[in-house]
Amino acid sequence: NMERIMKAQALRDSSMTSYMVSKKTMEINPDHRIVIELNKKVAENKGDKNTKDLIWLLFETSLLTSGFSLDDPTIFGTRIHKIINFALNIKDDDEGMEDE
């Protein structure tokens, strides 16, 4: 949380920012069924963009639930929209996106 407070300071010293950035460590439970399934997907096809998006979503969700902020929340939002489209079998995410 101190990292977030330092980023929000209006008159902060940019040289101090590098000292206040906390190192992030993600611990992975290799026996968790999500990790097992992601590992299978990666073994089947390392270049699958959907699998990479799922892995990034897992990481970014972990950051958010741990109290960190995302560097680029728009990318996170884009990944969420892709997953929603996939779950709803929507092929083109440009269709039906008109403002109401």
Image: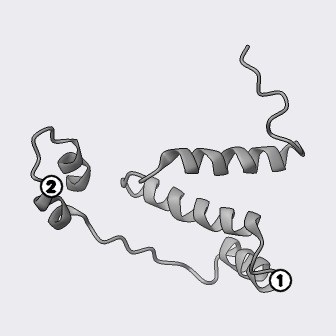
Residue at 36 percent of width and 70 percent of height:
24
For discs 2 and 1, the disc positioned in front in the rendered view: 2
Q: Residue furthest top?
A: 100
Could you say which quadrant of the image residue 41 lies in?
Answer: bottom right
Which quadrant of the structure image shows residue 16? Answer: bottom left
> Residue sitting at 26 percent across and 66 percent down?
22
Residue drawn at x 71%, y 18% is: 99
Residue 63 in the figure: left or right of residue 83: left
Q: Residue at the spot x=80%, y=39% of the render?
A: 93
> Relative to 86, does residue 9 appear above or below in the rendering?
above
Amino acid beneath label 2: Ser
- For residue 74, which quarter of the picture? top right
Place of residue 92 in the rendered image (x, y in percent of width and height, measured from the top left): 86, 42
Q: Which residue is mark 2?
A: 14
Where is residue 39 drawn, in percent x and y?
71, 81
| Residue pointed to by mark 1 | 44
Give the SS element for disc 1: helix
Placement of the C terminus among the 4 image quadrants? top right
Q: Is residue 6 left or right of residue 22?
A: left
Q: Which mark is residue 97?
A: none
Tell me which label, 2 or 1, sits earlier in the chain: 2
- Circle 2 packing at 10 Å, graded few (<14), some (14-19), many (20+), is few
Q: Tag 1: Cα neighbours inside 10 Å, few (<14), some, or many (≥20)?
A: few
Near-viewer residue (66 or 13):
13
Q: As drawn, is 54 to the left or to the right of 40?
A: left
Q: Amino acid at mark 1?
A: Glu
Q: CA distance from mark 2 to mark 1?
A: 44 Å
Residue closer to the observer: 21 or 88: 21
